[in-house]
Amino acid sequence: MLEGCTPWPEEFASRYRQRGYWRGQTVPQAIFEVIARHGSKTAIVYGGRRISYFELGQRVGAMARGLMRHGIKPRERVVLQLPNSPEFLVAFLALQQAGAIPVLALPAHRQAEIGHFIRHAGAVAYIGADIDRGFDFRAMADEILRRETSLAHVFINGAPNPGQVALDALMAADDETPLPEIGAGDIALMLLSGGTTALPKLIPRTHDDYVYNFRQSGAVSGFDDATVYLAILPLAHNFALGSPGILATLAYGGTIVMSAETRADDVFPLIERERISVVCGAVPLAIAWLNSDVPARHDLSSVRLFINGGARLAPELRQRLEEMFSCTYQESFGTAEGLLNQTRLDDPAPIRFESSGRPISEADEIRIVDDEDRDVPDGTPGELICRGPYTIRGYYNAPEINAAAFTEDGFYRTGDMVKRNNGSLYVEGRKKDLINRGGEKISSEEVENLIYTNPKVKGVCVVAMPDAMFGEKACAFLIPRDGETMTFEELVAHLAKCNIAKFKLPERLEIVDTFPTSPAGKILRKDLRKIIADKIAAERAGGGQAGLS
Ligand code: J2J
């Protein structure tokens, strides 16, 4: 295994193999097995393009060889940042076929984050778009190339800058270079952590564990070769990629319909035209669609399943989604670190509408514990900790963080407060300092550190505030230095200069003199969350404006 990664102890690994959870297959092997069976079937629909399984396989093989010709070697890390498109999938599988490890960045990430991923992963290459949504990724890559010493190659989907290589050009030559032998125990990809620390952590997933992850998640969602999956959430997210995501769709011989657009006006005609059967969404999308009159104008009879993940969706909205689509609702409470909980398709309505599901595998070991790691009884909230055949044993190259994030016997501390009733889990809150903006995670510490670089700031605390659409948004409580003050616009302008993803920006500023603290002097973030929640509720009741955006 790659240095810097924590393997499963042999006793666990051999059990997982023996019981068939680990099939000894790489991710591309799992997909090529299907390509061999379903050659002429449509694998991907994107805009006017229809790509067959056979063509997908050819493109992946050609790009893998092109990457090798450019000197990309097994176990080297490559940051992949592409909007939803067939090229994302081709590049992802091609990197794996060449033995390289894709590090999956979101299209929303900017120079600060991409630079960090490249440094932290020691990445040798970056694959990005030319221009997307008005942002020039080529210029960003040039800038990063000047600063990051490990980075040797920039591959661009579209028209590259001088010195960069077009992704298409990688596939130009027709060569028969043999592909390297990759072990199923090797690292297949690195996902980004949901952000509790100052800088995002990297989550190394092996081929064995990830193949099990998407096959098992797909089985629980009833995937088969009739599945037509709508891929609109960013594919770099574990949920959209492999839980069950596009990889399970391919593994079961289905068809992926991709779109980078999420508005009802774009999505619903697509559902009707392509006879989509599985729609994956997140809280803000579900709310926007339920409030739109577009769905009623379309034939949605092909939809059999709606899966929500990333953040909890309220029971009444789950029921309305079932009614709108005449489908089954599935709640997915997952983690990029591994553990996936999904409601079952045949769960009775109260479980489908209220619970957060239960682990997808009988091999998932979960415990719900108090602050002293003692098990709490069913019905009592505690922290969910877990281990199993697809839950990592450590973040990449992060021994100190690992010591806190995992128990000595290898359980991952999710930071989620849950209770268990009759085997189903119910998310009640969280211990970790993050803001869950409709499924997109914001690390308080990361944003606070950037705000502290402004000399006007004496103290800052970024906490979650309630939001009708996103569930939560970031609110900054700020103490200015003596004689200074700061406006919301100044705060945003300061953070914009830090070149970070826009979704991380606080959407409200509260200027205060002090922070509430415990007798030991610890800032009571819980109290700050309550202060802003109460204030917003009072503003709503008074008809005032809630939030600044
Ligand atoms: C409450 N909290 C949830 C839910 C995630 C499937 C689905 C989601 C993710 C994901 C994923 C939640 N209700 N339904 O990777 O494969 C919060 C929890 C959790 C954290 C993980 C998948 N679904 N959460 O969201 O790594 O706090 O993975 O610990 O981005 O999101 O975030 P992430």
Image: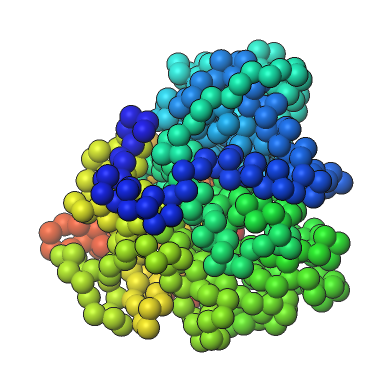
- Left or right, residue 284 beside residue 157: left
Which residue lies most toward the front here?
A: 18
Front position in the image: 324 or 365: 365
Q: Can you say whether 342 is above or below 37 in the image?
A: below
Residue that appears at 57% across and 72% down:
330
Residue situated furthest top in the rendering: 163
Q: Give residue 221's position: percent from left, percent from top.
A: 59, 67
| Residue under the image location 81 percent in, 64 percent down | 275
Residue 409 horizontal/vertical position (percent): 21, 53
Residue nearer the viewer, 530 or 272: 272
Name the residue rendered at 58%, 61% in the picture: 218
- The answer, for residue 202, to whether it is visible in the render is yes
Q: Is residue 149 left or right of residue 345?
A: left
Report the label total: 0
Instruction: Specify how the rendered protein is coloured.
Output: rainbow
Whole-percent x, y for residue 476 in the image: 42, 54
- Give above or below for 90 relative to 281: above
Q: Quadrant of residue 363?
A: bottom left
In this view, the residue farthest toward the left is: 520
Q: Along the line of sight, which residue is nearer the eye, 386 or 34?
A: 34
* Residue 509 in view of the camera: no
Q: Is residue 50 above or below residue 78?
A: below
Residue at coordinates 27% horizontally, 56% vertically from top-left?
411
Viewer-proximal residue among 100 and 420: 100
